Image (cartoon, grey):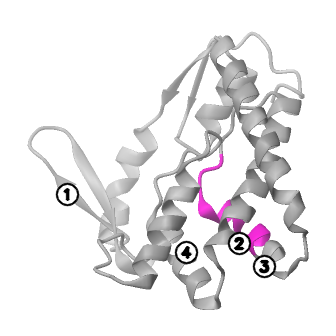
Amino acid sequence: MKQRGLKGVELFVSDKYLGLAENLAEFYPEPKWLRCVVYFYSAHDKLEERAVCCVVRDEGPMFMLEISDRFWPYQRHQPSGRSGPEAEFVQKVRGLLLAPACVQASFSAADEKLALGMYRRGVSIEQVTRAILLGCARKYVAMLNAGTRTPITSLQYFADIFEGVKESAIPESYWEPLRTKVTRMEQQWQKGCRARP
């Protein structure tokens, strides 16, 4: 929008399209953003009629939509009840994913499913650690060079990197200097974020 010459904006009104509100602030720091719920309110009855979702009403005007299983692309996130090596692997992956400052995720059911798939394919925790390190290095370089604040929001961001690390012959001597460099870039990025309004 900015590249097309949009100027003088005082207010943005939109749905909560993934990343839209966050990215608007990056390019247009002054205007306010409001979430438009008119479409949502007018459409929810039709969605419920077609069994796409059901409306869960609370007392008062507030309600919540629950997407029907056949339209939900993931398994519902429920405590897995797993124990043993699978559960331990998933917990370690969760910790590794959520540790870097450039990651803002909740470790969703999709992330858990991806982690289980890695475990079943024989991806090691060391490979996960290295892939996340390499992915974060790439992200920090992009964030520092482009001045963006858009974080990593899912384990899926690292999916191709996991496979690359698993199949590559990167020497052991590469990883410790990379870890040091990523730590420095993370600190530099955090310092830059605190300095911005």
Amino acid type at image mark 1: Val
Nearer the camera: disc 3 or disc 4: 3
Residue 78 shown left or right of residue 178 in the figure: left
Amino acid type at image mark 3: Lys
Nearer the camera: disc 1 or disc 2: 2
Decide which of tag 1 and tag 3 comes sooner along the chain. Answer: 1
Decide which of tag 1 and tag 2 comes sooner along the chain. Answer: 1
In the picture of the structure, the residue carrying the numbered disc 2 is: 127
In the picture of the structure, the residue carrying the numbered disc 4 is: 115
Return the residue nearer the eye: 169 or 52. Answer: 169
Give the SS element for disc 2.
helix
Amino acid type at image mark 4: Ala
Instruction: Please report the residue visible at 68 percent of the width from the left and 38 percent of the height from the top.
Output: 150
Give the SS element for disc 3.
helix
Rendering quarter of residue 133: bottom right
In the picture of the structure, the residue carrying the numbered disc 3 is: 166
Decide which of tag 3 and tag 4 comes sooner along the chain. Answer: 4
Amino acid type at image mark 2: Gln
Q: Would you say residue 80 is visible in this rendering? A: yes
Q: Which residues are magenta?
A: 152-162
Give the SS element for disc 4.
helix
In the picture of the structure, the residue carrying the numbered disc 1 is: 56
Decide which of tag 2 and tag 3 comes sooner along the chain. Answer: 2
